[in-house]
Amino acid sequence: MKRLARSFILASIATPALGFAQSTPLALLPGQPQELQIPGRQITTSWVVDVPADARRMRLELAAANPAQDVDLLLRRGTPFDLRTEGGIDVNQFFDQAHYRSASAGGEEFLLVSDANPIALSPGRWHIGLVNFDSAPADASLTVSFQQEESAHAQVEFVFDHAGTTQNPCDTSGWNDSTPLEPARGNPGTTLGEQRREAARAAARLLSEQLKPRLPVRIQACWSDLGDATGNRFTLAQAAPQSVFVSDVGFGSNLPALERDYTWFAMAAAAQQLGTSSCRIDRRIACGGEFDVRATFNSKLDQPGAARFDYGINSGASGVGSSFVSVALHEVLHGLGIFGLVNLEEDADGPIGAKLRLVDGGPAWDDAYGARAVAVNAGGEGFREFLRISDAERAAALTSFGRLRFAGERAATTAGTLNFAPPDNFIRLHSPTTIEAGSTYSHIQSFASYGPQLMYPTVGSTPPRELGIAGGMLRDLGWRDTPGTSKTFSSAPSYQFYDPARSGHGIDFRLISPSITGRDAEYFLGFYTFDADGNPEWYVSSGPVVDGVFVPARNTFGDSLLRQNYLGPNNSVSDASAAYSGTIRINFNNARLHPACQDGHPDRRLDGPLAVMTARINGERIQWCMQPVVMPGRVQRDFSSIWYSLGDSGWGLALQSFDGSTDRGTAADGLFSILFYADATGKPRWAIGQATDFRPGQAQPLRQVAGYCRTCPSTDGIQLSEPIGSMTLDLVQGGAGAQGNRISFDVTYPGTEGGRFQRDRVNLFPNSDPTLGGN
């Protein structure tokens, strides 16, 4: 095992909005290529696939007549793409709705989806999206085919003739060594180089037959000086994935078909789940030359006076040296997923036990292997998730000699320990009392009851050729080959949310009533926050929630998070200046897995609604873990909503009802208010009010909040000012379309800009329906 060469998160697509070519969707017929033309710089959703009940696999192919043209293939299960065509289609919003994507820089795309994928192939309608990024029309062929059996599997291949790059060269001379040898134990080669190639091919065949990958696996095979090869202990080889992939929509890397969000997967494991090759997952990888794994063998072996490899293909002890077939299998298994991403040495990456941060400025996401690891408590009873304990506790587990375990169900099944009680059913990981770099953690501990295993840290005299427990571990790491529970998506509740680690900032997030929008999933967001000087400011956004993700489209200026400029009564415009840019995504799926939600803040609640909000405002990017400001409870009358005044844009009101009952049981409805208004220069400002026992018609003070910027230390805290005005709410009924509600307020912004903003008994309308009862 060696350190990863690189990691990938997908980049947002920097392109203006594309046109939309739409017609009544037509169903593709299996085995009948559909010739079509995609207009230049257009998106179309004019094709669907109806999957039959007996289908186990589906292969979808898009081939441009000109392979150099950049066309992409997207796929959604169940519901159509939710596209907003005003000002053109936002390509990023389109891609963020795809369950599967094949998006290389060229014109040959494919998707392979089976009933074993995390978003499983299932009977019913699947929706196809096609994109042509070229200015010229693209003639193409679209084909679908089905298989009723899951028997076929793809091949594993060692590539012996790729010299690598200038930055990362690969010495291939060892595969062509002309030293004469006699054929031995099933290996027909007559030179050292030939026998090496034959042994590597044998390892590839064994791996393909046992792992049964759905997509081909390509291994860049190299030789290098990995140190002295004499004595009893030395390095035989090393391997690692060529890259890893993570799904985090906030970083432009929305890969919902990965079985675990916010988690690094080895390139080959990710490709199996995502249904296409790595170059079609990330267009920055060139198709044709990509490798899933890089394996490097020690060129010091087979030299005079050094240890030798045994190149026999038939199993059994030879007395010559370590089995090349078994060593190759062992190393490739590391590259397919049996590796952890925690620090084994105290260095620039942090202390021993620290999670590795693979992307500069990015979170320290989990990795698939670590997410399955547990640390067993001293005494052997009870355990904790390995990635949820402190760096120091992880360091202790790494040297605990047997108390570091792999808790995958399929691994336990393979080991025959599934029926044991936890943690005795978990697989023991190599955790000697002194850390062995490159060996600790990413191997199975030698244990008599396991029998011979391929992934022990050392090679025995008769190493196995069977994957054994390692095969079960890979099934737990993204390589599942049988149908399982298909991935589902969360709903998006309507609340006021905040991050306890960023107290004072927050959002009001509401489903707009379909009676107003005519759409089932249109949401409005008001983001109340502070500028660089700690002064209050606000932003707005609106758009759909698709599969638990808020994906507002960008406007014609490229913004999905809008800053409003107030120009006067009923005259408010979005900031279109080149000096402003804003985007936002909110993911309600599996937020507790995100590092922002695992910060250990004392007010963090992981047992209720959670979301990860990512916003980019000009040059700053924030990623916060959002939870409800108050845990919702039943109220007698629910006024929670974004409220507005018809014909009077540029200001608004966010209300959150809550249970204000006293400790003595006296029932009361509380109401928290955020008034969005503007100062004298038209800049957006906000003030708050709160009543623990709200009574319509009662005046309540409005206060200014002085806070800290979005990227400033949260220790700066917030301060409430003296009242800067007052507000009277005459509310009689909540719910969209409610009549008879009025507001009066008079507020003066206390900052240098100044400005008095007031309204007197104007009509007020909620845009969402009650969610807490009452009414």
Image (spheres, grey):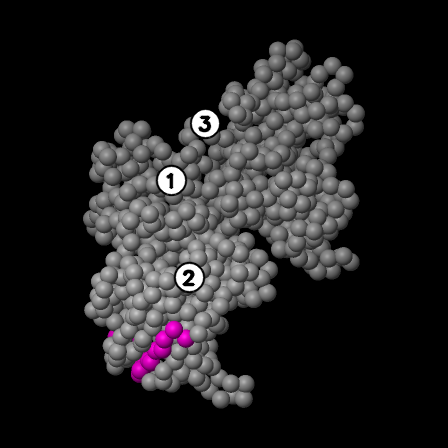
Q: To which residue does mark 1 refer?
A: 102
Numbered disc total: 3
- Residue 1 lies, in percent from the top left, at 64, 35
Q: Please, is residue 357 above or below residue 526 in the view? A: above
Mark 2 lies on a secondary structure that is: loop
Region in magenta: 723-738
Circle 2: is it few (<14), some (14-19), or many (20+) Cα within 10 Å? some
Specify the farthest residue to the front.
752
Q: Quadrant of the C terminus?
A: bottom left
Q: Quadrant of residue 378?
A: bottom right
| Residues at marks 3 and 1, CA–CA distance in whole angstroms | 17 Å
Circle 3: is it few (<14), some (14-19), or many (20+) Cα within 10 Å? few
| Residues at marks 3 and 2, CA–CA distance in whole angstroms | 52 Å
Q: Is residue 153 magenta?
A: no
Q: Where residue 289 is drawn, which disc sits there?
A: 3
Amino acid carrying label 2: it is: Asn
Amino acid carrying label 3: it is: Gly
Viewer-nearest of labels 1 and 2? 2
Q: Is residue 202 left or right of residue 650?
A: right
Q: Is residue 427 visible?
A: no
Q: Please, is residue 31 above or below residue 675 in the view? A: above
Residue at the image position 40 percent from the left and 78 percent from the top: 701
Q: Are marks 1 and 2 in contact (CB under 8 Å)?
A: no
Q: To which residue does mark 2 refer?
A: 535
Which circle's residue, 3 or 2, is located before the other in the chain?
A: 3
Residue at the image position 41 percent from the left and 53 percent from the top: 615
Mark 3 lies on a secondary structure that is: loop
Which circle's residue, 3 or 1, is located before the other in the chain?
A: 1
